[in-house]
Structures are given as C-alpha cells and as structure tokens.
Amino acid sequence: MVLDSVRRCGPSTRAEITGRLGVTFPTTAKAIASLLEAKLLEEYDDEQNLRGRPAKRVRLARTKSQVIGIELDHPDCKIVAAGFDGHTRPETLVSFRTPNDYESLLSEIGKHVNHLITQTESITLGIGLTIPGLVDYRKEQVCLSANLPILNNRPIGKDISTIVNVHCQMVHDTHALCMAESMYGKDMSAKPSFVMLAHRAGIGLGVMIDGAFLSGCDGFAGEIGHTPMIENGRPCSCGRSGCLETVASELALLEQASTHFGRDVDIEEYISLALSEDPFVMEALSEASQYLAMVIANVVNLLNPHRLYVNGRLFEELPWLLDHMSEQASQLALPLSFERCQFERAASSLIDGSIASVINHITDSLTPQVT
C-alpha cells in the first residue's frame, strides 16, 4: 500500500502517507524502512519547507535503483535504463537493427543489457520486455509473433534472465502501452478505463477497464490486426489472408509504396511523401484509415470507451490522420457511444511501456514482502 501510494501521489512525508492510508504512524514508518532497505524508495530533504528543519520525504528510487526496458520490434529494437520512479536515462538509450535469427537477437540484447548493469552503481531491479505478438504468461513464452517470427515458441524472457542474471518480465506490446499511458499519461487515476490502438508493423488493441486489462482467458485478447477484412485478400503473416494488417498496417503501406515506386520505401521516406501530399501515398493512407475506422467503430460500439488512444509513427508525424480516421469512424459507430469517446494520440511510447511494465511487476511482486 505504501509503495503504491507513493507511486500514485508522488514524493510524500511519512505523515502524508499515514493520512492517506488510514493506518498508524509506526506501521507506515516500518513499511517505509523496509522499502528503503530494498532500494525501492529513497529519502531526501524537502528544501521547499520554509519552517524549521527540512521535511524528510520519500520517493520511488531514482538514483539507487534502476530498471531496464527492452522494446522488441521490426525493423529495430531499443533498450534503455530508468530509475524505479520511471524516469528514463536518455544517455543510456541504444537502438539496433533486429537480427534475423534468435541467437543473434539474444546475443545483442545480452551485450547491451550487461553494459547497462555494470556501468552504474545503481542496483538493477528488473527488466521489462515488450513483445509484438501473443504471449502465454503461464508458460512464459511467445506463442505467435506474426511480424517477428524468430520469437515464436521461444521463452525469450527466461533466456534473457539466464544471460544477465536479472528477472525479465515479458508483456504484450499493447498491454505495455496501456500501462505506460496509465503511468505517464492522462489516465493516471486509480482505475482508468480506455482502449489503445497500436499501429506499427502490426496492429493491436489494448483494453483497460477499471484499471485492469481485458486480456481474455489466455491473454490473447485485442488481436484486431487479424480481423478478416478482404475475402481472398493478400496473405497475412499469421497464415490467414485478408487481415486488417494486410491493408492498414505500417508494413502493408510500406510494401505497397515500394511496389508502386519500384524501390524500397522506409518509414521516413513514406512520411516525407505524405507531407508533400504525394497522390499515391495520400490515397493509400485514406484507404487504410477507412479500414481502421471500420474496426474502431466496432470497438466503440462494443466497449463504449471514454477515450481511445492511438500509438504509431504515422499518427505521430501526420496529425491529420487521426482526425481523418475519427471522422470516418463517426459515420460507422453508434452515435451515442461515439460522441462520448475522445480520440487522442498516446502520450507515451512503447519503450515507456517496457519501463512501466517492469515497475508494475516489481510493485505487485515485492510489495507484499516488504510491507
């Protein structure tokens, strides 16, 4: 309770925490002592206290402890360190091209993570690992990553833990984005409810209701990227054909543009073409937006969310795209449900999600032992 109180309310004195929790002061003091010893909290003087001696405040550990976030994706992966308070250390950020085989990926991750662990006096509490695909949390392995198949049936979290000797927590990327938004964004209330559209090489949906994920019996909920859209359409990497990802994902749009222009078109060039209003790219984006709107309208009708976030490079660089998709969805969704749903770009990134995920895991797993 103490750790969660500090996480949600920020740096606090022992008296403030005692008042919020409704427990005795000795109970609070004992819990804080345990958390300080575990390096989950750290103490500092509040210099803004103008009367008498500076008040002692506690906050989530910023300097004494660190966590590491790993974002797995195609075509690039990212790794960064952060304090347990969630503040990333920009100077530690590294990015590398995703290797073509599993062993090389493990080797690359191990090299960078070990460097972050050994080059600091902070203790490393854990690692958060975002997976672009289905995760079996019970078996702790990846079931299916349509766009990064080298992960299929691999216990990559366990393998990383073995290499660096620090626990690594796997999480579905859309779940990670939801956690990041609830930690860093507007939905920082105790029990947030929203949906998160992840638009990247693949497409996924994260759903948070009253602070809990709607994950399904096996954790596979939210795979809207494999919603059937086109009968006998283009083959999808999942093994089916005509899925939403084949007509509306970043990867699909880049493949279409590469075929049209007769050369490899990467995301940077695609954005430049869109900014210059290239006719082919503009038409392709409008068509992809229409397909996304069809699925989003169903999400709005089914879940009645108060807010829908969108995370994706194209939506970040092309602000009009979200407005366009929202307008298209408004013509398809139930008016009453749509009117109460706000469409916004996500405030946090996937690498933020990896950090938020490991902090959430540590809080849930360690708090009972130290309070």
Image (spheres, grey):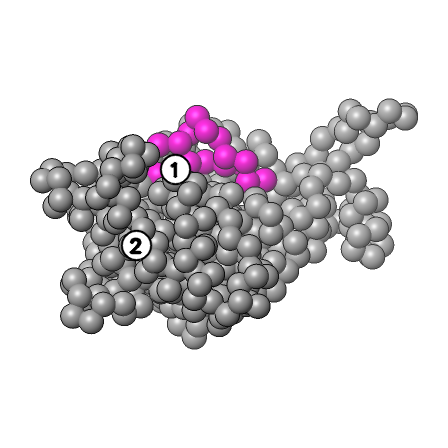
Whether the magenta-drawn stretch holds residue 96 is answered as yes
Mark 1 vs mark 2, CA separation in Å: 16 Å
Q: Amino acid at mark 1?
A: Glu
Among all residues in the image, which is located at the extreme right?
52
Among all residues in the image, which is located at the extreme left?
262
Q: Position of residue 224 (x, y in %)?
A: 35, 64
Q: Amino acid at mark 2?
A: Ala
Please name the residue shown 53% across and 63% down the image: 338
- The span shown in magenta is 78-97
- Residue 362 showing in the rendered view: no
> Which sits in the foreground, 147 or 154?
147
- The answer to whether residue 266 is left or right of residue 45 is left
Is 128 located above or below residue 331 in the figure?
A: above
Q: Position of residue 185 (x, y in %)?
A: 57, 45
N-terminal of the pair, mark 1 or mark 2, is 2
Residue tagged 1: 317
- Dot 2: few (<14), some (14–19), or many (≥20) neighbours within 10 Å? many
Residue tagged 2: 288
